[in-house]
Amino acid sequence: MIGITVGTRPEIIRMASVVYELKRRKIPFSLIHTGQHYDYNMSKIFMEELKMPKPDYHLNYHYKESTMQIYSIMKFLESIFAKEKYKFVLVSGDTNSGLATALTSIKNFIPLGHAEAGPRCYYYKTPEETNRKLTDHVSTLLFAPSPYSKKLLLREGINEDKVFVTGNTVIDTCLMFANNNKAKIFKSVKPEKPYVLITLHRAETVDDRRRLENFVKFLELLSKNYDYNIVFTIHPRTTKRLKQFGLYERLKKIRKMTILDPLGYFDFLVFLKNAHLLITDSGGALKEGSALKVPVIVVHENWGDQEGYGEFWFLSGSDFKNILKLIDYIEKNNVRNKIKKLQCPFGDGKAAKRIVDITSRFLEGKIKIKETSFEDMLKLYRTL
């Protein structure tokens, strides 16, 4: 029996193709939902749309504070692991849910596989950086999305026997549903083209009053100076902060602006596919935009992905005036047409097949992980 944990929208999307592949091969597994995203639109609707099986275990409530959230998930998983006796556990990404799964697995001596292993931004104000690095270093098998991610893992001293380049499962799921015809909200809103699609949710962006106010100023300038409509799908955290800081009413007054609640997966893909440009701080949305050949501006100081930078996507930093400069660059250099001729840098849609292949071979004893010997350790020390 293989255990799979999900807890957030990105994890559900990343693991959907893996679940489909396990079901296709009739490999027994159980699905555990840690409840990190407890809002319906942020979690359950994605499970339903992607036809994911109902979780065998679901944590309905835990603390919202980061450390206590990890504690409550670990406590929840501890009882499940004692009961199920999993032979292998699969986790993905860089969330609190993923880190809690990794720590609980290793403490129970259960081999762990980490999908999307290896990306680094080396920016430790980002909680996700700590989560993914700790998860990588306790994993038995590391499924790197690209050769570049593999190089970063090896540079940190991780045994090459454990690292496999598979591509990113986000691309698998995105390509699987890119042409869906179930986008009800898109059909009712009928956004006028060209429009810029916007998502924003990270704590370091929306919890800082000055940064969030500057982003609203940017949207006002975008509406005033550019011939774009704006579609802003607002994360619950962002809505809360906009109202808390007295910015929500100001946002609503911006011309050519459509404000939407968080979208289901099918609607988000159709809004994204038809967008002129995506502005986001979401790693998943960045990859989905790249798969659908839509230019992406990432609102962040630093970033873990390097693949496709300067071609498919661009980093704005926290100065929102840079976003306007990047929009001008994208238009003047015809980026939209150029990327249509390029291959998506994050995968080819076959990552789940590779992950299940490797996991099966490991469980059959066909993949042996070499233990680090004293001699190996000395060699590593001599390179430092």
Image (tube, rainbow, N blue to C red):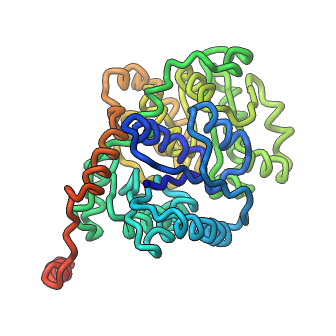
Q: Which residue is drawn at 26% across and 66% down?
A: 155
Residue 67 in the figure: left or right of residue 164:
right
Q: Nearer the viewer, residue 330 or 268?
A: 268
Task: Give the tally of numbered discs.
Answer: 0
Work out whether 351 lies above or below 30: above
Q: Could you tell me residue 244's position as x and y percent?
A: 84, 53
Residue 180 vertical position relative to residue 117 in the rendered view, above or below: above
| Relative image position of residue 139 (x, y in whole percent) | 37, 65
Q: In which quadrant of the rendered image does the N terminus lie?
A: bottom left
Taking the spot 65% from the left edge, 30% from the top edge, the residue there is 222
Residue at 64% x, 34% y is: 48
Residue 341, placed above or below residue 291: above
Asked if residue 184 shows in the view, the reply is yes
Q: In this view, does 191 lie to the left or right of 277?
A: right
Of residues 291 and 115, the one nearer the viewer is 115
Vertical comparison of 74 with 356: above or below? below
Q: Can residue 346 be seen in this view?
A: no
Q: In the rendered view of the protein, which quadrant contains the C terminus?
A: bottom left
Instruction: Residue 260: name its quadrant.
Output: top right
Please give left or right for residue 374 compared with residue 324 in the image.
left
Q: Nearer the viewer, residue 307 or 61?
A: 61
Q: Is residue 163 left or right of residue 124?
A: left
User: Residue 295, how many percent across, how many down?
Assistant: 47, 30
Q: Where is residue 70 in the image (x, y as percent from the top left)?
A: 61, 68
- Nearer to the camera, 76 or 280: 76
